[in-house]
Structure formats: C-alpha cells, structure tokens
Amino acid sequence: MRPQSLELAQQLLGFNTINPPGNETDCMQFFAAWLAAHGFDVSLSHFGEGRTNLIAQLPGSAAGKPLAFTGHLDTVPLGNQPWQQDPFGSDIVGDRLYGRGASDMKAAIAAFALACVQHHALITAGRGVVLMITGGEETGCDGAKAMIAAGKLPDVGALIVGEPTANYPVIGHKGALWLRCETRGKTAHGAMPELGINAIYLAADALGKIRHFSPGAPHPLMKQPTLNVGRIEGGLNINSVPDRTAFDVDIRSAPNLQHATIRQQLSALLGEEVTLTTLVDLPAVLSSEANQWIQSVYQRCQPLFDQPLEAKVVPYFTDASLLLPALGNPPCIILGPGEPTMAHQTDEYCLLSRLAEAEKLYGDLIEDFHQR
C-alpha cells in the first residue's frame, strides 16, 4: 500500500527549485493553495525575485503553544554526473521515489502536511499546528533569516525539522561558520615578478597555516570540529602577477565553541595579510534528551529500530540554527523519512516504506502533543 502523501510528494518534486537561483515561488504557491484547500490559514512572504517563504497554521482552541514543523523547498544543483532517472519526474522504481529533493526534503514536507490534515479535528481542538516552510536553506538559511526579519513567527511548544534522518530521532546538529579569506598583493608583468607582490603566494602561505588549525576542543556528542577549504580563486591571466586571491573555509562547530572566538583565533594565526569576511554564521543545535517531549518522540520512534535509541546528532546544518533562538528555544527534534546518504546525491531517492513510516510517525507525534 502506497503512502497517502505520495501524490503530494510527487507534485512538489515536479517543481525545479534548484538553489541557486531557488525560484521557490511557483512551488510555494502550489503548496499554499493545497494547504488552504485543506483548512490551513496560509501566509506567503517574498525575500527576493522568485524567492518565497510560507507560514501555515491550523489554530487550536485549547490553551498552550502549538506544535511546529519546518522544512525547505529549495534543493541543491543536479551535479555533473548524469542522472538515470528524471530529477523532476518523481519516478517510482520498486520502493524508491526518485527526484532532486526526494530525501532532502520534499517527501518529509508532504508527509507532515498530510499528517496534519489527517488529524485536523484533534489539532483544532487542541493547541494547533504551525508549518514554517522556507526557501534558500541550502545556501545558508537565507529564507529563515527573512522569515525571522519579517517578525511574524508565533510562539511554539516544540519544533520538528523534517530533514533526512531515515526516521531516526536526532537531537542536534553542528554549527556552520563559513569564512572568505582574502589576500591582496601588487600586480606586475609576469616577466618582471620582482616588481609585484604575488597574492597567490600569500594565500599559499595562509593555507599552509590553516591546514593544521583546530577550531577547538571536541564535544561529547558532536566529536571533533572540522575545517575544510572548499574553494579558491585568484589571478586574471598567466602573464601577470596576481594582486588578489580568495579562498573559502567551511568550519563545522559544536555547542561548546563560540564562532567569534574561532574567527578571532584564525585571524590571529593568519595575520594582517589575510582579511576575513563571514559568509555564514549558524550556531549548533542541541536539545536535552531529558526533555519530556523528546522522550515521547523516542518512544514513538523506538519500534522502528532493533537497537535501543541513542542520543544522535548530524553534521549538516538546518534552519533550526536560526529558528530556534527566534522561537524562544523550544525542544527540537530532527526527524524525516529521507536517507541521509542520498542528500545532494545523483539519482536522489526516498524510500516509499520510509515515507509511509513518517506519515504515521508524524501523526502519532501530533496525537501525543495534543493529548498531553
């Protein structure tokens, strides 16, 4: 028996929302119309040409803060490898639903939206539900930033992030600090390099230092923080001394580390010849396992796994980095049907069996929340 949310998932996958440029508006408008037709109060907001966020609510009649779900509709590019399946065709082969964004994370959005519709009466008699659907997550949570800046976020009692976890409850994720490091030299003719200052050489010296830089001490759950130089560019032509070089650094941190401190230490290491610019600054997320609601989520998830559940975190970032502080830091769980290993991959897929599990799991969590 196929998941009831499959049709909606396929419809969402049919939209090309690759970021950059994003172009989430058409997909978001379709989803907004679907939600409105199923009784949600829907508000769309734009944060650039073709860029859109959505907040949808099923208000409750009982006292207390609502349950919130969040997800993003933008996806990463297709990559250079050819796809065997149509990335926007939502093809089904066996137990696999293919498409860019199937695991990360349109299937999850379909599953929690449908679960809300299935439990409409319980939600409206209880404390309500809020869906916060963003664009621009893949390039540094741009949509979440715009949503927060708009100042329309409600208070919520708990937050579920539908990122891919294969339905395993995850209590946190690493933070992300992306820095651009720039060196400036002096241009000259390539045949007379002694008259210039080579910015590439300056960058090479900086890279030698940064390669062995440690962002800080390990965390009990998130282990060692990581650093990766992911991009470098410099020079205009082969026969000139380059007067500018830039390289981008991706640091993944943990709650025990302060990004301002990491940046300061790195700046001191590299010296005055390197200018640092912050591109992305997203704090780590970690909820307490002891929280009563987190424990109730564990109880619902446990039957899906043979071994006892353990505290688990993921290395990727989510919109929760920014949404949680703006929402007053409610308990948060990252939980979605997508396969973590399929995120950003060629021929990305989500298992239909996982989607069906998530549909029921989200429904169970809605029931638990509104019967507390």
Image: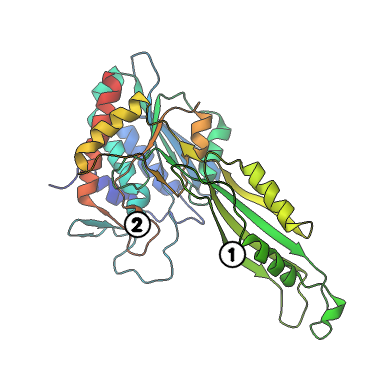
Q: Which residue is mark 2?
A: 341
Decide if residue 79 is on the left or right side of residue 185.
Answer: left
Residue 17 in view in this figure: yes
Q: Where residue 369 appears, x then y in whole percent?
A: 30, 24
Q: How many marks?
A: 2
Q: Which residue is mark 1?
A: 231
Residue 58 in view in this figure: no
Q: Nearer the viewer, residue 282 or 202?
A: 202
Question: Marks 1/2: CA distance?
Answer: 23 Å
Could you tell me which secondary element the residue under label 2 belongs to? Answer: helix
Residue at screen point 47% across, 46% down: 317
Q: Where residue 62 appears, x then y in whole percent?
A: 33, 14
Circles 1 and 2, Cβ within 8 Å, touching? The answer is no
What is the crowding at mark 2: few (fewer than 14 residues within 10 Å), some, or many (at least 20)?
Answer: few
Residue at screen point 33% across, 46% down: 165
Quarter of the picture containing the C terminus is top left
At label 2, the amino acid type is Thr
Decide if residue 310 is on the left or right side of residue 241.
Answer: left
**Residue 103: mark in rendering:** none
Q: Where residue 76 appears, x then y in whole percent?
A: 44, 57
Question: As drawn, which residue projects farthest toward the left?
Answer: 1
At label 1, the amino acid type is Arg
Colour convention: rainbow
What is the crowding at mark 1: few (fewer than 14 residues within 10 Å), some, or many (at least 20)?
Answer: few
Question: As drawn, which residue projects farthest toward the top?
Answer: 63
Residue at screen point 67% across, 48% down: 263
When asked about the image quadrant of residue 98, the answer is bottom left
Task: From this view, report whether residue 260 is shown above or below residue 293.
Answer: below
